[in-house]
């Protein structure tokens, strides 16, 4: 993943305009990298259950007293309705068998791949996990798990939500209605709960990349929000002085 020019340090001020004329929407992982994420997270899940003295995943058909280790997990990348992979981590955690689940979530597609797992460096008290997958070290930042079981991670510059489920839990999840996707690509979202203390633009203004848009105050710290794109302000949704929740839309571009 990533841009070759960026990796080589060729980053003039016109880099975004030259390489991403439609705007930069984040790093997209290749299929091989997605499989590496799935295997790494399955290995982490296996290690976590060991550290927790064998607590089963939800709906695993096994009693606590009989539980030894995870046999098979479904790793979904991109939220609950993202791309899913069936992963079996070998008994010695040295090899993983992975197969992608089809888009309809009715079965698998392609051949099962057996990929070597090397040393896993995982500590639940730190943000960084390192694991060798297919003889290539992968470095993953893990930002914690929310109440819905989603773990936010970053690998190779790509941010994503990952959920790890037992096969039965995954099967039942396929009956759930997929939530509507809200396009926030043209919005400035509040990065944290806080108060809008100033607004530096107004509707109709033509905005340049990096221009100050507003200031959000949280925990007595003032955070300047700058534009990550060029465009024209279409709407301002929050009044100065108002309290905001995280991801609330502050303003919109045309």
Image: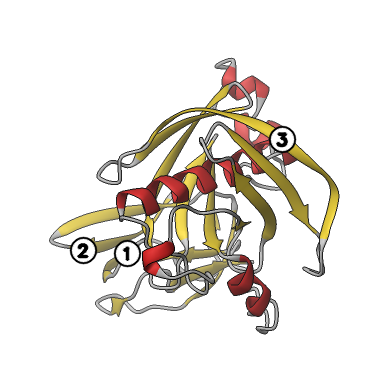
Q: Which residue is mark 2?
A: 218
In the displayed structure image, the side of residue 137 where residue 33 appears, left or right? right
Residue positioned most to the front: 66
Residue positioned most to the right: 110
> In front: 218, or 179?
179
Quarter where residue 79 is shown = bottom right
Q: Which residue is mark 1?
A: 192
Residue visible at 51% across and 71% down in the picture: 203
Disc 1 crowd rating (10 Å Cα; few below 14, some 14-19, many 20+) is some
Of the two numbered discs 2 and 3 on the same chain, state the one appearing first in sequence. 3
> In front: 151, or 93?
93
Q: Which residue is mark 3?
A: 114
Q: Where's residue 140, x and y in %?
A: 46, 38
Q: Where's residue 23, x and y in %?
A: 65, 47
SS at mark 3? strand
Residue visible at 71% across and 35% down in the picture: 114
Q: Where's residue 223, x and y in %?
A: 27, 54
């Amino acid at each position: 993943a990533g841009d070759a020019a960026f990796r080589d340090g060729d980053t003039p001020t016109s880099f975004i305009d030259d390489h991403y004329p439609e705007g930069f929407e984040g790093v997209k992982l290749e299929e091989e990298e997605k499989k590496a994420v799935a295997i790494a997270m399955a290995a982490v899940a296996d290690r976590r259950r060991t550290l927790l003295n064998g607590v089963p995943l939800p709906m695993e058909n096994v009693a606590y007293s009989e539980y030894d280790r995870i046999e098979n997990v479904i790793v979904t990348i991109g939220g609950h309705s993202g791309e899913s992979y069936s992963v079996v981590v070998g008994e010695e955690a040295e090899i993983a068998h992975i197969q992608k689940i089809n888009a309809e979530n009715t079965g698998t597609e392609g051949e099962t791949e057996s990929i070597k797992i090397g040393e896993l460096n995982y500590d639940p008290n730190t943000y960084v996990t390192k694991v060798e997958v297919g003889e290539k070290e992968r470095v993953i930042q893990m930002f914690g798990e929310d109440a819905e079981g989603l773990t936010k991670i970053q690998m190779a510059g790509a941010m994503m939500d990952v959920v790890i489920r037992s096969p039965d839990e995954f099967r039942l999840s396929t009956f759930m209605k997929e939530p509507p996707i809200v396009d926030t690509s043209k919005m400035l979202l509040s990065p944290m709960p806080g108060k809008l203390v100033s607004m530096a633009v107004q509707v109709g203004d033509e905005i340049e990349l990096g221009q100050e848009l507003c200031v959000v105050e949280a925990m007595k710290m003032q955070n300047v929000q700058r534009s990550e794109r060029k465009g024209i302000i279409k709407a301002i949704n929050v009044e100065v002085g108002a309290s905001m929740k995280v991801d609330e839309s502050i303003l919109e571009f045309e």
